[in-house]
Image (tube, rainbow, N blue to C red):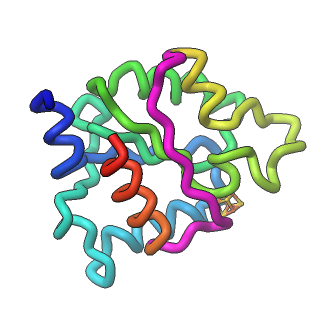
């Protein structure tokens, strides 16, 4: 097992990307970091740059405005990395599916850049913090 995979499994550093979410999913991500759920105790840490990240937490259905930014952020993230598509919008565009401005979902945009990208899905509208934490832990243990 390479040191990068070991680090990814033991203490994944994550970068949060909003690609047009209504912000409810983002509030649940913040709740994961707050003292009640405190994901840092599991080594999961939010970082300010994709260059420092092992995983991307992506919310939203990916709007036309956000698509190119998501591609660039993915390219900047150290590989191997895991992309978490959070919420119904991240998984399959959710209630925003018929929006004129929506070009996602997340997996479609990421696979344009890297067909072998590792993508995990955490459904819910919004997913509860428990679901987000469980999804991250399950996906990382499956690697
Ligand atoms: S999944 Fe629901 S809560 Fe999350 S961004 Fe979409 S509409 Fe908002």
| Residue 102 as seen in the image, left or right of residue 73 | right
Quarter holding residue 97: top right
Does 73 lie within the magenta span?
Answer: no
Quarter holding residue 63: top right
The image shows residue 33 at horizontal and vertical percentages of 31, 68
Q: Quadrant of the C terminus?
A: top left
The image shows residue 87 at horizontal and vertical percentages of 61, 57
> What residue sits 69% from the left and 43% below the top?
61
The image shows residue 42 at horizontal and vertical percentages of 20, 65
> What residue sits 75% from the left and 30% below the top?
103
Quarter holding residue 40: bottom left
Does 121 lie within the magenta span?
Answer: yes
> What residue sits 46% from the left and 25% below the top?
117
Residue range corresponding to the magenta coloring: 114-129
Residue placed most toward the observer, 104 or 130: 130
Up-down: is 55 above or below 75?
Answer: below
Q: Main secondary structure of the magenta part?
A: loop
| Residue 114 as seen in the image, left or right of residue 30 | right
The image shows residue 76 at horizontal and vertical percentages of 34, 22
Up-down: is 117 above or below 134?
Answer: above
């Amino acid at each position: 097992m390479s040191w990068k995979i070991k680090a990814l499994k033991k203490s994944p550093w994550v970068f949060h990307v909003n690609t047009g979410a209504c912000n409810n999913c983002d509030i649940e991500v913040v709740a994961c970091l707050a003292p009640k759920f405190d994901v840092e105790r599991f080594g999961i840490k939010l970082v300010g740059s994709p260059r420092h990240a092992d995983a991307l937490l992506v919310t939203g259905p990916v709007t036309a405005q956000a698509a190119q930014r998501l591609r660039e952020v993915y390219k900047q993230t150290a590989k191997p990395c895991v992309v978490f598509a959070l919420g119904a919008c991240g998984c399959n565009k959710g209630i925003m599916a018929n929006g004129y401005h929506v070009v996602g979902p997340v997996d479609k945009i990421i696979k344009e850049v890297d067909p072998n990208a590792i993508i995990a899905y955490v459904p819910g509208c919004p997913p509860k913090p428990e679901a987000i934490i469980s999804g991250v832990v399950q996906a990382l243990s499956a690697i």
